[in-house]
Amino acid sequence: MSFTVTVQPSGKTFTVERDEPILQAAIRQGVGLPYGCRDGACGSCKCRMLEGRVIHGVHQQKALSHEEEGAGLVLTCQAAPQSDIVLEARTVPGAGEFAIRKLPSRVVSISKPAPDVAIVRLQLPANDLFQYRAGQYIEFILRDGARRSYSMANAPHTVIDTPQLELHIRHLPGGKFTDHVFGAMKEKEILRVEGPFGSFFLREDTDKPIILLASGTGFAPIKAIIEYMIWKGSERKAVLYWGCRGRADLYLNAWAEEATARLANLRYVPVLSEPKPEDDWHGRTGLVHEAVMHDFPNLLEHQVYACGAPIMVESAERDFIARCGLPDDEFYADSFTSEADKHGP
Ligand SMILES: Cc1cc2nc3c(=O)[nH]c(=O)nc-3n(C[C@H](O)[C@H](O)[C@H](O)COP(=O)(O)OP(=O)(O)OC[C@H]3O[C@@H](n4cnc5c(N)ncnc54)[C@H](O)[C@@H]3O)c2cc1C
Ligand code: FES
């Protein structure tokens, strides 16, 4: 048995099989809906149901509270229709553009630009171009079937000549996958990946100035977006804010500084929340999203692309919209949720 989902105001329709989450069916049929974690943790897929009935699978209250559910909001990644339904949701042109594929990949190199950050390069099959948008992510499919998501840090055009993906992976001690990356992972290891996923990429139907906001390894997809803009010769005004704890955590600071010379209208503002005396830091300090609000008290005409720690992404979305007038449909984000977020308070 299948049900029909209609998305308003675009009028797009697609079918969902019994017990299948709406988002899974949309991705399968190339319909672009907004989403992030695909796992009920980030809230990026939240939208309003205008008609119909759904049953929600496990999800975080932070992503969808009881009150929101009562008010007719749904998480498409966790909601299985029980009838035909009508949703009110932004459609994301380009999100379903490239087929999602499962591929074998081989670890080419692992470097450690900071004590808890690994840059892993993955070789993809040659003669089989892997296409994606700068900002999207892949999932590793682990032996026990668990999945872990990582954003591509290199822009798609770089893969044409060298079929490799660059990933920036932060160690979460006790974490199933990153303990392996920082422990036993060796060059030549074979890993299964699936992708590309995600709706976090540059919207190019406007020239609005952009704020690129990263915390920690949230820099990875932002780097890919900047590489893409350099390749395209983009003239859009952009300011990159990269927030980390200490100086060593700005693991590609030189790259970011050089990017401002290669992209005409890019500025770069690193922000440290806990600089140590030995960092000899004379730059900005504090919370990175507060640095943005200090510099841009009015974000009415901007787009914001934010990526990294869930707390940073949530604070930025809330405060930019409430205090700086950012239109809520101009905030684009990938929140790096993990098991801790799914099982936490
Ligand atoms: C769209 C997306 C893109 C992402 N991109 C990146 C990226 O580019 N770079 C990056 O570094 N990360 C990224 N992440 C995060 C990444 O997918 C992983 O969640 C992260 O690397 C942790 O994986 P892990 O297996 O090591 O840890 P997990 O096994 O998820 O554990 C994480 C932490 O939670 C603790 N924990 C485990 N289970 C529980 C439990 N039941 N209760 C409480 N605590 C628990 C662990 O001890 C550990 O400290 C992304 C996430 C998403 C959703
Ligand atoms: S909660 Fe649905 S995509 Fe994250």
Image (spheres, helix red, strand yellow):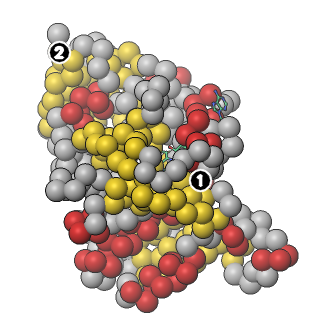
Numbered badge on residue 170:
1
Dot 2 alpha-carbon crowd within 10 angstroms: few under 14, some 14 to 19, many 20 or more: some
Q: Is 24 drawn above or below residue 151 in the view shown?
A: above
Dot 1 alpha-carbon crowd within 10 angstroms: few under 14, some 14 to 19, many 20 or more: many
Quarter of the displayed picture in which ligand 1 can be seen: top right
Residue position marked by numbered label 2 in the rendering? 2
Residue at mark 1: C-beta within 8 A of ligand 1: yes
Q: Is 242 drawn above or below residue 260 in the view shown?
A: above
**In front: mark 2 or mark 1?**
1
Residue 328 is left or right of residue 62, and the answer is left
Residue 79's x, y, as percent?
36, 23
Residue 336 is left or right of residue 44, and the answer is right
Residue 164 is left or right of residue 31, and the answer is right
Residue at disc 2, secondary structure: strand
- Determine if residue 73 is in view: no
Looking at marks 2 and 1 on the same chain, the residue that comes earlier in the sequence is marked by 2
Residue type marked 2: Ser
Q: Nearer the viewer, residue 344 or 210?
A: 344
